[in-house]
Image (cartoon, rainbow, N blue to C red):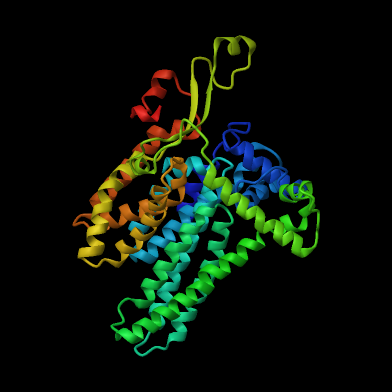
């Protein structure tokens, strides 16, 4: 089953990956930065994000050269592994193969997950590290539940298992891909705290001591370890300090020191500048949208558009057949996202009224990876939801599992997702269509 799911995901994400045969959308930033890493060790211009995701892109460039396939394959592999990790997480949650496989297939066939995995951007890489950390936290939970005994001392709660520390490493990679990976740090901490404190029935004083111990251990494993990993991902920056944008700016300001202290000081200031950049960023873009509409697919993101005009046809310069148009739209699969809207109340009810720990465990990442975007009180881009897709799929699978007819409803969910993929694949893979056929794929006015 794991190999079949990985094969399905990879087949979709690697198929004709070299098309479009040019940089498109934000590839012009991240693929270029990744090329700079291989040539200079650092970006030539001002970076907008930490380096880890761009190193993943650079790995593909190193292996396959500076081609469209080369700068996309690293992200495609990350997206394929995410499907596998969704399945493994589902096994830990559901203890059954069928709902775990259902969740993985839903991710494999989701349009947002697919399009994000076929473009040299950072969000699919971030999703990989977030789901990997979640999976490791589940492994830590199972390891702790197996070894937990009555009267257990506080040391085990403080230290946890080796999986908790590996989750810290993975969280460091997530934050080093995009700072929104910090949301995953929060969800990991909540899940670890819940594991250690629930179901013990300890007196208040002992429970308080254990909470303090767990919190202290979480600071070490889920905050300090990620911080060290985050800093380590800048090794190329420190090694090629004089080539960095920050060093050149510091030199223009009259401070050209290259000592370890100078480099650390400039690096720290560059992180502050990066915070200021994102906080103050008010760029206008036709596909920016309110996070409130993301769960129901209010505003997808058009990332590629191609058509063949009469002049291009006469000049022999068409990228698509005459009288056709090609689009790539970062749009979730309605066969997953819209049924999931019905699943969320079910999960909440089961978590509160039925004390369903599985439903609660899924609700934590669903909430923490989305709600903070609402608190930001500014529009963003729908593709920020890429790391949430595996948890949407797990949530729908859990809601199906909790019904009286899980096999029937599971088959319905699978059929809806497969039908959605078959219908929307042309606008996820950039396949040329006649205008009338293409317009049929844009169901809502806000999708245009």
Q: Is residue 184 toward the left or the right of residue 338 in the image? A: right
**Is any atom of residue 113 visible in this view?**
yes
The residue most toward the bottom is 151
Residue at image location 59% in from the left, 56% down from the top: 176
Residue at image location 39% in from the left, 68% down from the top: 191
- Establish if 24 lies above or below 62: above
Image coords of residue 28 (percent x, y):
63, 36
The residue most toward the front is 254
User: In the depicted view, which residue is nearer to us: 386 or 426?
Assistant: 386
Image coords of residue 88 (percent x, y):
43, 61
Q: Quadrant of the C terminus?
A: top left
- Establish if 171 lies above or below 317: below
Q: Quadrant of the N terminus?
A: bottom left
- Establish if 291 lies above or below 202: above
User: In the depicted view, which residue is nearer to us: 109 or 165?
Assistant: 165
Residue at image location 55% in from the left, 10% down from the top: 310
**Is any atom of residue 81 visible in this view?**
no
- Establish if 209 lies above or below 340: below
Image coords of residue 292 (percent x, y):
35, 43
Q: Quadrant of residue 346?
A: bottom left
Image coords of residue 296 (percent x, y):
33, 41
Q: How many marks?
A: 0
Q: Quadrant of residue 207?
A: bottom left
Q: Is residue 114 toward the left or the right of residue 417 in the image? A: right
């Amino acid at each position: 089953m794991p190999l079949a799911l990985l094969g399905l995901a990879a087949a979709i994400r690697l198929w004709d990956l070299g098309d479009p045969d040019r940089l498109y959308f934000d590839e012009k930033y991240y693929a270029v930065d990744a090329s700079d890493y291989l040539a200079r060790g650092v970006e030539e211009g001002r970076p907008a994000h930490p380096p880890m995701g761009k190193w993943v892109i650079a790995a593909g460039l190193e292996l396959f050269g500076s081609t469209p396939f080369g700068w996309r394959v690293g992200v495609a592999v990350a997206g394929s592994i995410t499907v596998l990790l969704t399945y493994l997480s589902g096994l830990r949650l559901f203890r059954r193969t069928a709902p775990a496989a259902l969740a993985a297939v839903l991710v494999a066939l989701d349009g947002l997950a697919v399009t994000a995995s076929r473009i040299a951007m950072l969000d699919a890489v971030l999703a990989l590290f977030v789901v990997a950390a979640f999976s490791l936290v589940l492994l830590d939970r199972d390891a702790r539940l197996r070894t937990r005994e009555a009267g257990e001392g506080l040391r085990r709660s403080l230290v946890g298992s080796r999986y908790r520390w590996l989750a810290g490493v993975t969280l460091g990679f997530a934050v080093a891909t995009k700072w929104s990976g910090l949301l995953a740090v929060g969800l990991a901490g909540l899940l670890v705290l819940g594991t250690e404190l629930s179901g013990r029935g300890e007196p208040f004083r002992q429970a308080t001591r254990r909470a303090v111990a767990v919190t202290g251990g979480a600071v070490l494993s889920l905050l300090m370890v990620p911080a060290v990993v985050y800093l380590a991902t800048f090794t190329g920056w420190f090694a090629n300090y004089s080539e960095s944008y920050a060093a050149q700016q510091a030199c223009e300001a009259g401070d050209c020191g290259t000592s370890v202290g100078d480099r650390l000081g400039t690096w720290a200031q560059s992180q502050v500048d990066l915070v200021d950049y994102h906080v103050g960023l008010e760029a206008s873009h036709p596909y920016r949208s309110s996070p409130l509409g993301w769960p129901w697919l209010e505003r997808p993101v058009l990332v590629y558009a191609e058509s063949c005009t009469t002049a291009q046809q006469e000049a022999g310069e068409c990228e698509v057949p005459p009288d056709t148009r090609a689009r790539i739209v970062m749009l979730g699969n309605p066969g997953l996202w819209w049924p999931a809207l019905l699943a969320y109340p079910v999960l909440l009810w089961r978590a509160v009224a039925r004390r369903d720990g599985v439903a609660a465990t899924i609700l934590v990442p669903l909430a923490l990876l989305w709600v903070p975007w609402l608190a930001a009180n500014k529009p963003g881009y729908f593709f920020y939801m890429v790391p949430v897709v595996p948890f949407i799929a797990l949530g729908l699978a859990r809601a199906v599992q909790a019904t009286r007819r899980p096999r029937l409803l599971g088959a319905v969910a699978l059929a809806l997702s497969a039908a959605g993929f078959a219908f929307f694949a042309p606008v996820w893979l950039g396949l040329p269509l006649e205008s009338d056929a293409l317009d049929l794929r844009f169901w809502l006015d806000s999708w245009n």
